[in-house]
Image: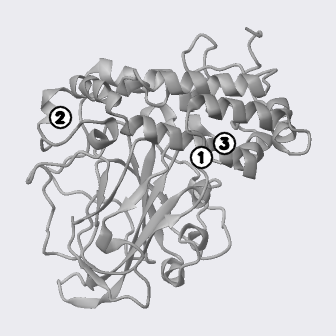
Amino acid sequence: MTSKTIDELKDKIKELYNDKTGDFRVKFDAAIAGLQPPTVDPKSDVYKDWRGATGDTLAEFFGEWYQWGWGQPIADGLLYIRKFSWISYQNDAGLAFVHSESGRDVLADFTNLQGLQMDDPDSEDLVRKWIDELGPKRMADFKDGDWSTLNKFFIRELKPGSRWIDDSLDPSVVVAPTDCVINMIVDDLTDETPLPIKGGVTMNVGRLLAGSKYAEKFTGGTAVSCILMPDTYHRYHAPVGGEVVEARDDVGGVYYGIRDFPDLLNKGNVGYGYDYSLFEDFRRGYVIIKTPYLDHKGDPDGEGHVALVPVGLNSIGSVQFLEKFRNITEKSAPVEVRKGDEIGFFQYGGSLNILLFEANRFPALQLLMGQRIGVLQEVAHTERHMERYRRPQPGPFPPAS
């Protein structure tokens, strides 16, 4: 049963832990027994010593996390996610706990409460804090709107013209689906069997696309990650134009349980060299776009497919498509889409888009002179977002606090 208040959830956690007929306590205790030393200074605000934790500890932690949500600044958007992640960091038993039926139920319950919190009219106070922290330069990109809750602000819309769609009439040019940090993942996708590539990176595209018949189209192809940071634009758009031939926004999955969360942040170079295979099990959707190919002369060169896979990470239970792109099947008529058209949005939390390309069609990230490749940020901004996530060499557990 879904909790209506944080106190109900806390009671639920305690009851689960004390229930000798279930496996919640067994799996949680095994997770705590398998803890690995965190890779941050014990004085860091993202450190959490879980040693000796019980159901009461976990219940109180979620209570603190919920109360923190009423006053959070953007820079602290990963604070409690990181604190919780030490349970599953390099810990198979920790992953087993958060991915177990009872563990998933508790985390989904908490995620739902966070969503209600972000939809609460009282969250309007947070909106003002976020606007102040983003500053007038960045806010100038967005339309004014109904920002009476944080979730409404989180899915704010861009002003027309604030993002230029490169070569809108050239189908061979791929554009970023959203404001993001981009990394190549793998260049030899498999449709069924995970294949280790580039030092352990894997991607089972059949699982990622939830068994879609189009998965085989990407065998031997390329995947690209587009990671959204908490303070960026959270609507996503078509990377190419053509026809949407299949789409789902309801692929269920887990919300938490990233084994190597510090590696994802990776000293500010977000997602570089990361193993994205775990995202095959996270809540997600996908859109398959049939698109025309051109040869080097600009003449027709057949047609193929590009997939956009929005993935909801920690605290995201919301992968939402616009109505016309929901649940398109082989029994539906294809839906025309132009490059840059909005597909959907994420509400509050962490997220990424994964782009899939067919074999030999997207060999590298390529930019033209004068296109944006990044921003020279003020030192304070970078330090606020990344300093606490820098990864020292692992060591033994610090003395118990």
**Image position of 161 (left or right of 72):** left
* Residue type indicated by callout 1: Ala
Residue 339 spot, x, y in % from top left: 21, 69
Q: Which mark is residue 138?
A: 2
Task: Residue 228: give x, y in percent of width and height.
Answer: 38, 45
Which of the 4 quarters of the picture holds residue 137? top left
Indicate the secondary structure of the residue bearing disc 2: helix
Nearest the eye: 76 or 370:
76
Query: In the rendered image of this protein, does residue 121 appear above or below residue 109?
Result: above
Residue 78 visible in the displayed image: yes
Task: Please provide percent x and percent y for residue 285.
Answer: 46, 65
Disc 2, disc 1: CB below 8 Å? no
Determine the CA span between mark 3 and mark 2: 36 Å
Farthest-out residue, left: 161
Q: Amino acid at mark 3?
A: Val
Which secondary structure lies at badge 3?
helix
Question: What's under tag 2, amino acid-wise?
Answer: Arg
| Label drawn at residue 106 | 3
**Mark 3 and mark 2 residues within 8 Å of each other at the beta carbon:** no
Marks 1 and 3: in contact by CB < 8 Å? yes
State whether residue 32 is above or below residue 68.
Answer: below
Residue 314 seen in render: no
Residue placed farthest to the right in the image? 20
